[in-house]
Image (spheres, coloured by chain):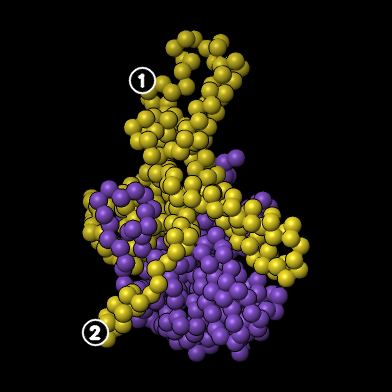
Amino acid sequence: MDDDISDILASVSAPLPSQRKLDLQALTRAWVNERTSPTLLPYPSQLIDRVTDRIKKQIETIEEMTSDMDPKSNFILVVLQTELERFKFLVRSFLRARLAKIDKFPYHYRDLALSDPNILSHLEQQYLQSHQALLASHYHASFLSIFPQGLQKLDDTTGLSMIDRPEEDSAVFCRVLRDAGGVVIQSEGGAGEVELTRGDVWVLRWRAVKDAVVRGDVELL
Amino acid sequence: MALLLPPGLTPAEVGFLCEMELVTVIPRQRLDELQLLGGPTQPLNPPFPTPLPLWLALLLKRQKRANISPPPWLSVECLTSILDFETDVRTAEVLSPPPKLPRPTGVALEDEPYLSHESSELSPPFLPESSTSQAQSDALPYHWLELGHLLLTHAADDFDDANAIRRLLRDLQEVRMSKLRKGFRVLGPGAGVKMNGVGGMEVAEIRGFLLSGMSAGTNMMCRRINRPNEENQKEREANERENGFGGDDYQDDEDDMQL
C-alpha cells in the first residue's frame, strides 16, 4: 500500500520529460524494432523529420563553436560531437535496415505500399522504383530479351508466385510493455494462447505480435 | 546503402544501447547544463552526485573529470546472493527475477500512429533507476552484463573489489547461459518461450541458437534432437562461434560507435 502511494507521488511530482528525450526514446525503439523484425514497420515520418532537423541545427551549433576557438569550450565540443555521432548512427542504421528489407523483397513492398501508404517514406518509394527500373532494364538487356515472351516477367504471379515475401513466421524476442490480453500461437499440437502481461519477455512468432508492436503494447529485443 | 547484417542486434550494438542507461556520477569539476539532442543534461556541481547517461559518464571518467558511483546491485554482497539464487536447485528452471517495474504511464489509444509519445511506455535503457546509485539492489537489470563489463573496464578504481566482482559476473554469466541453453533443448518448435529476467547481451548471444531451431519449420527441432549427439555438439559449437560474444566480426568503421 505504501509502495503504491509513493509510486503515485513520484509520478505526479516527476517533471515531464522533454520532447527531445521522448524522441530519443522513440527513435531508439524504432531502431531496435526495425533491426530485429523480419518485415518493415510503418515509417515514423514526423519523428525522423524532427530528429534530422535537430541534427542539422546541432551541426551548425558545433561549427559556430569551433570557429570561436574558445579553449574553454573544447571539452563541451567533444561531448556535443560524441552525442551527434551517436544520433547519426541511430538514424543511419535505422534507414539502412529498412533499405535492406526493401532490397530483399522489392515487389512485395511495392505492392504493399499501394494499399498502405504509411509503410514507406516518400524517398524510399522513389528509391524502390528507380532501383527496380534500373535492375529490370539491366536484366532485360543482358538476358531476359532472348527468353520467350511468356518468361520475361520478373513479378509473375500466375502459377507459382515469383514475388518473394518476408518470413512472418520467424521467431522474435519481445518484451511486453502493457498488458495486452492473449495472443494465439500455432504449434504442432494445435493452437495455444499466450497471455501478454507487462514486463514479460517472450520468444514468439512475429505474426503473433506484429500488431501489438505497432500499437506500442510490445517492443522487440 | 543497405545494411548487410541479419536481423538482431550485434553485441556491439547492445553495448551501444547500454551506454544510454543512466548512472550516478560524482563530479570533480563544474559543468554547466549542455543542450544535447537527447535533451539537456543536468549541471554538474562537485561533489553532488548527478545522474548522467553512461556514454557521457565514461567520457568524463576518462578525462578524470568525474567518478562513477556503481549501482548497488554491482557489489560483491548483492551479486553473491543473486548467484546463490541462480545456482539453487529449486530455481534451476528460471532466471533470477528482473527489477520491479515502475507503474505503467500510458494507455493505448485507438488508431494512434506507430511510436507516438502519448502512449509510449518506458523500457530499458531508459528506465530511470536501473543502474544509478538508487537502483534496486537484489535484481539484475536488463543491461547487467554490458554495464558491469563497461564499468569494470573503464572505471575499475571506483569499485572496492573489482576483481571479485569481475569473477562473480563471469560465474553469473556461465550459470545463466547454461540454464538458457538447457531450457531451449526441451522446446517445441511452434510454442512460445517465456524468458523473464534475460539480459540484453544474453539475447544477442542465444538468438541464432534459438531462432534457427524455431524458424526453420516444424521438423527442424525433431531432426536436431534425433541426430547423433556428436553432430549436435558440432552444430552447437558452430553456432557459438557464429554468435560469439566478442562482436569482433562487426567491423563497420563508419558505424563504429565505441567510445
Name the image quarter holding residue B25: bottom right
Q: Residues within 10 Å of mark 1 (few under 14, many from 20)?
A: few
Residue B102 visible in image: yes
**The residue tagged with tag 2: helix, strand or loop?**
loop
The residue at which mark 1 appears reads as A158
Residue B233 lies left or right of residue B196; in this view the side is right
Is B212 located above or below residue B58 in the figure? Answer: above
The residues tagged by marks 2 and 1 sit, at their Cα atoms, a distance apart of 65 Å
Name the residue: 67% across, 67% down: A76
Q: In which quarter of the image is the N terminus of chain B?
A: top right
Q: Quadrant of the C terminus of chain B?
A: bottom right
Q: How crowded is mark 2: few (under 14 residues within 10 Å), some or many (20 or more)?
A: few
**Between A83 and B54, the one nearer to me in the picture:** A83
- What residue type is disc 1 on? Thr
Residue A218 visible in image: no
| Residue B233 image position (x, y, % from top left) | 52, 60
Is B161 located above or below residue A87 in the figure? Answer: below
Cβ atoms under marks 2 and 1 closer than 8 Å:
no
Name the residue: 56% across, 24% down: A135
What color is chain A drawn in? yellow
Name the residue: 54% across, 49% down: A52
The residue at which mark 2 appears reads as A1
Q: How many labels does the image show?
A: 2
